[in-house]
Amino acid sequence: MDHKQPGLIVILGPTASGKSALALDMACHLNLPILNADSRQVYRGMDVGTAKATPEQQRLAPHYLLDLRDPDRPVTVREFQVLAQQCILRFHRRGTTPLLVGGSGLYLAAVTQGLRPPALPPQPVLRRQLTALGQPHCHGLLRCADPVAARSIHPNDKVRTQRALEVIYGTGCAHSLQQSRHPPAYPVLEIGLAPEDLRQRIHQRTAAMVAGGLLEETQRLMERFGVELPLLQTMGYREACQLLTGRMDRQQAVAAINRRTRHYAKRQFTWFRHQHQPHWLTSAQAQGWQTIPRDLRQNIVDLVRKPTDSAPTSA
């Protein structure tokens, strides 16, 4: 692998698969920055429910693309793409290869494959109208207007369904036809996590989130931004809202979060297996830098080594 040009190392995988822990260990061993590619961690105040890196973890290795905006100001995929590309370029000018870490498929595709999403800003009035119609009806509209996009968006995915319809009505052109790809010129090395014990990991993380302040965080978001905040309908927060408003008890909320997270993780796996070709790691191989297979570690070292380095970091 040509190590003269800085590149990008990507750690992807389903939620709760251990991406953040592996990235932090790699970053500490190789002195690399971590770039966030989680579509909810870009928002301030959404920490516990998104498993965002803690202040202590951020002190161990520099993290970027976190806390970009308040959650009532949506960050589009195109906006994230521009910010990520600018961040990567700054590190490349220093001869540094950063780590891009996350499980948000469109965010990853925008950076690693040069997906060119429409730059149309959110349309609040249209979104309220679509919400009033209901998700089943909206997905039906999408199937009629853009069958290709409808096949790639789960019938229960309200956010992506509304965005696709928003683009169609706002531009007059099918959403799927506007997503051209222009891959980056620099080398990209992708690592995928596929833990065999993912179900157990999901349940453990849900319990940790609830114990770690998910309800208190949701209460603060409700008080500041209102219960109609779209991000409060996302995984974990919606169930916390239902618990706080008496529509669920604690046991029901935890079970619902676990169930919804498992379904989301399954969709993530499907996306990654169709859209990416990473070096897949098992649970045992993804414990940390030293447990990564030796050949892959050498590939990583070759990529992150700067032109002025006289010898590679020990693999």
Image: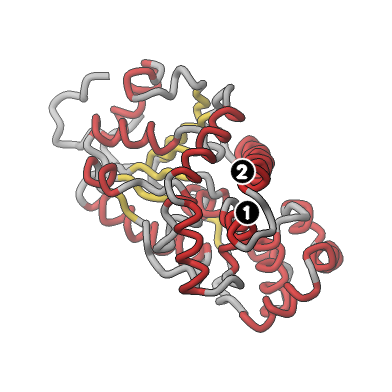
> Quadrant of the image for the C terminus?
top left
* Amino acid type indicated by mark 1: Glu
Question: Residue 232 placed where, x, y %?
Answer: 57, 63
Q: Residues within 10 Å of mark 1 (few under 14, many from 20)?
A: many
- The residue that appears at 38% across and 34% down in the rendered structure is 21
- The residue that appears at 66% across and 41% down in the rendered structure is 255
Q: Please state which of residues 9 and 224 is positioned toward the viewer in this rendering.
A: 224
> Quadrant of the image for the N terminus?
top left
- The residue that appears at 63% across and 36% down in the rendered structure is 269
Q: Is residue 214 left or right of residue 267?
A: left
Q: Is residue 91 left or right of residue 100?
A: left
Question: Residue 302 placed where, x, y %?
Answer: 29, 28
Q: Which residue is mark 2?
A: 254
Q: Please state which of residues 63 and 189 is positioned toward the viewer in this rendering.
A: 63
Q: Secondary structure at mark 1?
A: helix
Q: Which residue is mark 1?
A: 239
